[in-house]
Amino acid sequence: MQKTILSIIAFLQFSYLTAATDCIGVCVDLKESFFNEQSEARYSYKHYELREIKNTSHVNSKWNNSTIKDLKINDSSIQESSFSSVKVGNAVVNNSIFTENKLSYSSYSFASFKNVNLEESEFNNTKFGKASFVNVDATETNFNSTVIPRAIISHSIFVDTEFKYANLILSDIRATDFSESEMNNTVFLSSLFTDVTFEDVKLSSADFSLSTFNNVVFDESEIKYGSFTMSKISNSSYIDVEMNNVDFSMSEINNVDFSESDLTSANFAFSILKNVDFTDSKLEYADFSGATFINVKIDGAKYTNISDDGSSGSPF
């Protein structure tokens, strides 16, 4: 009997941990009533060693141009407020509603957001020394020209966001949905992507060079003039994607579906392509010079004027 009870407890604990791990977006019930409620409070042009907000609601409050060494926000709601041009040392925001806020032209040495609703907020031209977004809902949030090197983004929703001209080099991005977003000219150099969705996303001239991808979806996106140079891409799909002039040179591409995509003038020079599907794709003027082909499908593909000089196992 005791063994049975222990087995049931172990099963329930395992199920809970699995569910928590699989959850994407805010995974706790955020508070809706608060001990302290503030409206139109003013904290601008001030200096704080520590600013702690807990079990508090703020609507239309302002912290503009303030300096905050340590900012801690827990179990609170801050909406339609402004943190523009603030300078923050360490910011930790947990289990909170943080929607429709203006946080542009600010700087954070470090910021952590966990179980936070960031919908419709603005982080344009903001700089982070390092930042993490875990179980965050950032739907319709703007990060244009934001600098977030070494970002950790996990189990989050960034649907319909604007992330144009941003810098996310050396980032680790996992189990996150960026569908229907605009991310043109953003730099993801040397980043890691695992279980990420970029479906119907504008990524023209985005730079993914030297990155690693596993189980990533780019279907129906626009990645013209983008770069995946010297990247490792596996178990991923680029179905019906506009990718003319994209650079995949010197990359390792394994178990990837490019079917129905426009790869006109794409560059695959010196890449290794294994278990790759180009069915019904457009490959005119594509460069496969020096590439290695292993089990590559080209059924129905258009491939006039391609170059495969010095390649191995070419199906063309």
Image: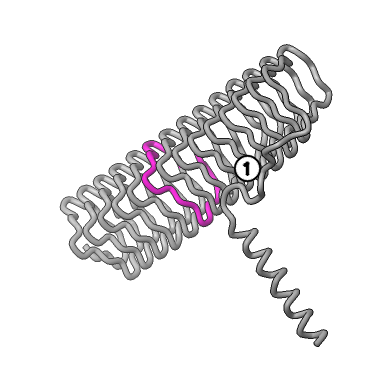
Left or right of residue 176: residue 33: right
Residue found at x 68% / y 28%: 108
Residue found at x 57% / y 52%: 24
* Label 1 sits on residue: 133
Residue found at x 67% / y 37%: 130
Q: Which of 283 and 151 is in front in this view?
A: 151
Residue found at x 24% / y 66%: 315
Position in image of residue 75 (x %, y %): 73, 39
- Segment tinted magenta in the rendering: 187-207
Does residue 198 belong to the magenta stretch?
Answer: yes
Q: Quadrant of residue 183?
A: top left
> Which amino acid, by three-letter code, is at mark 1?
Phe
**SS majority, magenta:** loop
Position in image of residue 187 (x %, y %): 49, 37
Q: In which quarter of the image is residue 71?
A: top right
Does residue 300 belong to the magenta stretch?
Answer: no
* Image position of 200 with respect to 84: above or below: below
